[in-house]
């Protein structure tokens, strides 16, 4: 099928033809018109580039589309914002089939629908590689955006969900025989963590309401993102290795994959879990609320301390600096 821009936009519009709350003029005009909410507007954008962030033959287009939205919503979640609108720009090589693009946009629609986000506009262009640029807006009550810079010594360091699963999924994809590991439950679970991450939007609201002082989403790995939060807050942190929530599927498959599960949990990227600092007394109430409302665990893995830098405390009490050597997009 020839992929003229006209036909492509028609196909995309068909996938997205839904009435959305707050949208005055949706896709198809020169620009979208939306109603502002009553709070402050939170803006973010994130770029996915073929061969840098993904391989086209290693991820289903529907998963890729959903992920492109989710990684953006994760940044809004990390500010304790509620997502509202999204814009998408696509760079598409000539060899991409229209069906692939329709699946991609279908995945975007799924992720938007899950979080009641309206995809209100977009653009396409020829490109040498697939490039997916998404911009999102969200809303937060005035003065209530949760930044990286409010952590205080004595705060507990908490993280939602499990860590290292996405890096484990990458290890599966890059192994000599991915099909062999994908026949195992743990292999499929790791691959899914990489291809279909979740945006912790509701969980972020619970953390914010419980008095979180700082928050960041884990896109580049705990070591790197925690060091960013500490730098922004002018504090240090201690992380107890024994309390790092290593994904169970990663523990199960680590030996077969020949990877160190703790290392992937500390330095692997793309988990999109939330790392927050909260008053120590808030840990238990937040933990039960996240478990009951979302079925998501909360790990208390360390504390904020005075000074700078992040220290990893091993099971035997040995302390080593945790270098911010998270996943590097340019490695
Ligand atoms: Mg982020």
Image: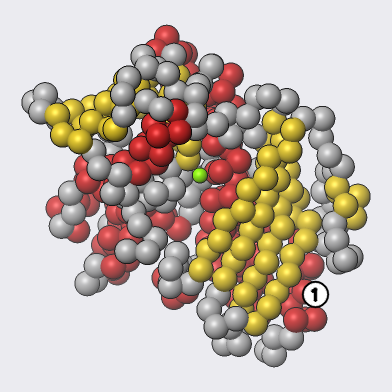
**Which residue, as the protein is rendered here, is positioned at the far top?**
281
**Which residue, as the protein is rendered here, is positioned at the far bottom?**
2
In which quadrant of the rendered view does residue 329 lie?
Answer: bottom left
Q: Secondary structure at mark 1?
A: helix
In which quadrant of the rendered view does residue 98 lie?
Answer: bottom right
Q: Is mark 1 within 8 Å of ligand 1?
A: no
Left or right? Give the position of 91 relative to 171.
right
Viewer-nearest residue: 151 or 190: 151
- Quadrant that contains the C terminus: bottom left
Q: Percent from the top left, x then y, of residue 16? A: 76, 61
- Quadrant that contains the N terminus: bottom right
Examine the rendering and report whether any part of residue 188 can be seen. no
State the colouring used for the structure image.
secondary structure
Q: Percent from the top left, x then y, of residue 75? A: 56, 43
Give the residue at mark 1: 10
Q: Percent from the top left, x then y, of residue 252? A: 22, 47
In which quadrant of the rendered view does residue 22 lie?
Answer: top right
Examine the rendering and report whether any part of residue 1 can be seen. yes
How busy is the neighbourhood of tag 1: few (under 14 within 10 Å), some, or many (20 plus)?
Answer: few
Left or right? Give the position of 165 relative to 83.
left
**How many marks are shown on the rendered structure?**
1
Viewer-nearest residue: 271 or 58: 271
Q: Residue at x 57, y 56 (%)?
A: 46
Q: Residue at x 67, y 66 (%)?
A: 89
Q: Residue at x 28, y 32 (%)?
A: 310
Q: Percent from the top left, x then y, of residue 222? A: 34, 40
Is residue 113 shown above or below 273? below
Left or right? Give the position of 255 relative to 151.
left
Viewer-nearest residue: 163 or 221: 221
Q: Residue at x 28, y 60 (%)?
A: 171
């Amino acid at each position: 099928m020839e992929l003229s821009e006209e036909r492509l936009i028609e196909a995309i519009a068909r996938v997205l033809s839904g009435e959305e709350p707050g949208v005055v003029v949706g896709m198809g005009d020169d620009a979208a018109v939306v109603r502002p909410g009553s709070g402050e507007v939170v803006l973010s954008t994130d770029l996915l580039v073929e061969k840098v962030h993904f391989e086209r033959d290693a991820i289903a287009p529907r998963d890729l589309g959903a992920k492109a939205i989710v990684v953006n919503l994760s940044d809004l979640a990390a500010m304790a914002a509620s997502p509202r609108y999204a814009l998408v720009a696509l760079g598409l090589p000539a060899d991409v089939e229209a069906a692939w693009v329709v699946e991609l946009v279908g995945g975007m629609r799924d992720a938007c629908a899950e979080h009641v986000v309206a995809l209100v506009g977009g653009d396409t262009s020829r490109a040498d590689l697939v490039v997916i640029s998404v911009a999102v807006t969200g809303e937060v009550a005035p003065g209530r955006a949760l930044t990286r810079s409010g952590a205080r010594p004595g705060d507990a360091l908490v993280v939602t969900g499990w860590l290292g699963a996405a890096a484990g999924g990458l290890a599966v994809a890059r192994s000599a025989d991915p099909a062999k590991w994908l026949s195992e439950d743990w292999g499929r679970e790791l691959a899914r963590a990489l291809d279909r991450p979740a945006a912790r939007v509701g969980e972020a609201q619970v953390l914010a309401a419980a008095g979180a002082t700082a928050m960041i989403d884990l896109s580049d790995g705990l070591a790197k993102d925690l060091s960013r939060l500490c730098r922004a807050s002018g504090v240090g942190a201690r992380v107890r290795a024994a309390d790092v929530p290593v994904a169970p599927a990663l523990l199960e498959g680590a030996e077969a994959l020949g990877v160190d599960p703790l290392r992937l949990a500390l330095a692997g990227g793309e988990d999109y879990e939330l790392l927050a600092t909260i008053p120590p007394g808030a840990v238990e109430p937040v933990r039960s609320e996240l478990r009951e409302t979302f079925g998501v665990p909360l790990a208390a893995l360390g504390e904020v301390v005075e000074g700078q830098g992040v220290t990893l405390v091993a099971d035997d009490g040995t302390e080593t600096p945790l270098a911010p050597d998270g996943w590097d997009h340019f490695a």
